Amino acid sequence: GAVVCDLCPIGSYCDEKDEPPKPCPAGSFCLEGQTVGTPCPTGYQTTLTGQSYCRICSP
């Protein structure tokens, strides 16, 4: 049979194999298949959960 791999959706992370996806926390972003959120780099931020990117900080 075919093997099916379900990746965690963009904006979410999946830290437990059989648990549902969790929204990426504020201050980080999540791409498809992540098990933890990636912190926004210096000079970027997000104040919302479930994000797939960080915005450039305003001066």
Image: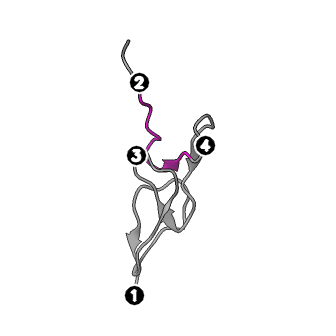
Image quarter of the C terminus:
bottom left
Image quarter of the N terminus:
top left
The residue lying at 53 percent from left, 68 percent from top is: 27
- The secondary structure that most of the magenta stretch takes on is loop
Residue type at mark 2: give it. Answer: Val
User: Which numbered disc flags the more N-terminal residue, 2 or 3?
Assistant: 2
> What secondary structure is marked by label 1?
loop
Residue 59, disc: 1
| Residue 46: % across, % down | 49, 68
- Closest to the camera, between mark 1 and mark 4, is 4
Q: Residues within 10 Å of mark 4 (few under 14, many from 20)?
A: few
| Residue 22: % across, % down | 59, 47
Task: Quickly name the residue at label 2.
Answer: 4
Task: Quickly name the residue at label 4.
Answer: 16
Q: In this picture, which residue range is highlighted in magenta?
A: 4-14
Of the pair 22 and 59, the residue shown nearer to us: 22
Task: Quickly name the residue at label 3.
Answer: 32
Q: Quadrant location of residue 25?
A: bottom right
The residue lying at 43 percent from left, 45 percent from top is: 33
Residue type at mark 3: give it. Answer: Glu
